[in-house]
């Protein structure tokens, strides 16, 4: 009496007790060249604990952590 659709308890892929993988948050320094998915190329002009200010030429924006759309060049 075996059921092929039955998956043993220890082989299930998701577990409510499994540790969540924490994303790696990039670090930026003043004068780093960066690109943003919406604003394009820029340069970091100020670094705070949980935010960076980036000069995109036409405007300077403060972008908060985790910097999802901001990437190093």
Image (tube, helix red, strand yellow):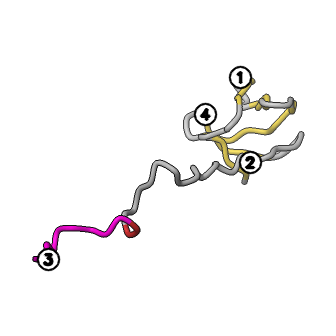
Q: Which residue is more in the foreground, 27 or 39? A: 27
Q: Which residue is mark 4?
A: 39
For disc 3, the marked residue is 2
Q: Which numbered disc, 1 or 3, marks the residue that appears first in the sequence?
A: 3
Q: Secondary structure at mark 1?
A: loop
Callout 2–callout 1 Cβ contact below 8 Å: no
Report if residue 7 lies within the magenta region: yes
Query: What is the CA distance from the residue labelled 1 to the residue labelled 4?
Result: 9 Å
Q: Is residue 23 above or below residue 58?
A: below
* Residue drawn at (67%, 38%) of the image: 67
Quote the CA–CA distance across marks 4 and 3.
Answer: 58 Å
Residue nearer the viewer, 20 or 23: 20
Q: Nearer the viewer, residue 23 or 59?
A: 23
Q: Please give the label number shown on residue 59.
A: 1
- Contact flag, marks 1 and 4 (Cβ < 8 Å): yes
Q: Residues within 10 Å of mark 3 (few under 14, many from 20)?
A: few
Callout 1: few (<14), some (14-19), or many (20+) C-alpha neighbours within 10 Å?
Answer: few
Q: Which residue is mark 2?
A: 26
Going by the picture, which residue comes out furthest to the left?
Answer: 1
**In the figure, is residue 25 to the left or right of 14?**
right
Main secondary structure type of the part rendered in magenta: loop
Q: Which residues are magenta?
A: 1-9
The first of marks 1 and 4 along the sequence is 4
């Amino acid at each position: 009496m075996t059921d092929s659709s039955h998956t043993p308890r220890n082989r299930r892929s998701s577990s409510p007790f499994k540790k969540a993988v924490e994303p790696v948050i990039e670090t930026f320094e003043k004068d780093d060249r960066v690109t943003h998915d919406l604003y394009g190329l820029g340069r970091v002009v100020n670094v705070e604990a949980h935010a960076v200010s980036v000069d995109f030429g036409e405007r300077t924006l403060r972008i908060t952590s985790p910097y999802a759309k901001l990437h190093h060049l």
